[in-house]
Image (cartoon, rainbow, N blue to C red):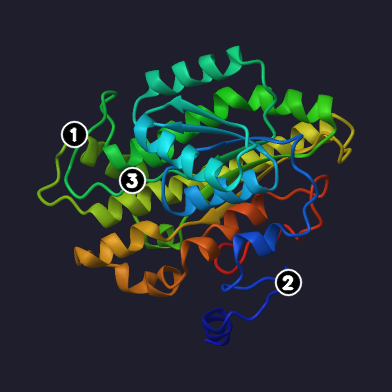
Amino acid sequence: MLETLRYLVGSAGASGYGSKSTAEQVTENCRDLHSITAIITGATSGIGAETARVLAKRGARLVLPARNLKAAEDARARILSENPDADIIVMGLDLSSLNSVRNFVSEFESLNLPLNLLINNAGKFALEPAVSEDGIEMTFATNYLGHFLLTKLLLKKMIETAKTSGLQGRIVNVSSSIYKWFSGDMIRYLCEISRNKLRDFDPTRAYALSKLAIVLHTKEVAQRLKLINAANGGQRDGELCSSRSRQNQTHKRARRHGHRYSIFLDFEALENYSSGCCHNLLCSNTSSTCKCDREVLFGLQ
């Protein structure tokens, strides 16, 4: 209860920030980020767009992959109107398609750019049952499976960048506390919703499943990266870390449609985009590029 009250009033935690902190406040102590290249999925609106805006303001080169290229170009134009010198690349990517993910990675690698930050922010809340071209339920395919493959295919590039630059890389997976509300056999439920074997499709449970998968994936990636770092002598220079944040823009949509569990998300939905995306940026900060504490704000431990 005390933690909830502190959250509502915006009290600062151990990191020095609270729920009322903004993205610009979280990054105000950062040095010039012109040496940083970041890929941000879901950057055309909401938290992703604000994350991109602030990173561009700090000087980072941005790669904005999107299914809707017009929306991505509009997002790029908004950032350039504020920061005319920003380096922003728009590329096509449909996260629900594994073939599209592979094509995106191939095109990105052809640019011969470094990669310091990968922010897996994009998310989908499918209200009706649907499957991807790969036969996977659409919410899971977009929120988790696409990001899983994207991370896997880009990991080698990120490790190489960390080694050559000496700057700590960071993977940020955006999850949600709704993951705690999923119970049961994950694989069985995924098979059921992918094959449309359930009488009633529960969008919120499908969403919770995808977010739980993200949390589990993040833990596994973090553990494997620790082993890689240890094998390289455990040095901080060139280290690659994996963190997790959380998102709120889908929660309002869930409440509007009356899906169960949504009442427990109200506290998170109180955040605006500037406050909400500070989780992404706080997780993105590394000791090599910024003086910010790396603790995730409120919620996921």
The spot of residue 134 in percent (x, y) is 29, 24
Instruction: Point out the residue furthest to the top here.
Output: 110
Observer-side mark, 3 or 1, equals 3
Q: Quadrant of residue 60?
A: top right
Query: Which residue in the protein does label 2 denote?
Result: 16
Q: Amino acid at mark 3?
A: Lys
Helix, strand or loop at disc 1?
A: loop
Query: Which residue in the protein does label 3 denote?
Result: 124
The spot of residue 249 in percent (x, y) is 38, 58
Q: Is residue 67 visible?
A: no
The spot of residue 157 in percent (x, y) is 67, 23
Residue 217 as seen in the image, left or right of residue 167: left
Q: Amino acid at mark 1?
A: Arg
> Which quarter of the rendered picture does the C terminus lie within?
bottom right
Q: Quadrant of residue 38?
A: top right
Residue 154 as seen in the image, left or right of residue 263: right
Instruction: Please tell me whether residue 103 is drawn above or below residue 250 in the rendered image.
Output: above
Nearer-the-camera pick, 122 or 66: 66
**Mark 2 vs mark 3, CA separation in Å:** 31 Å
Query: Which residue in the protein does label 1 denote?
Result: 195
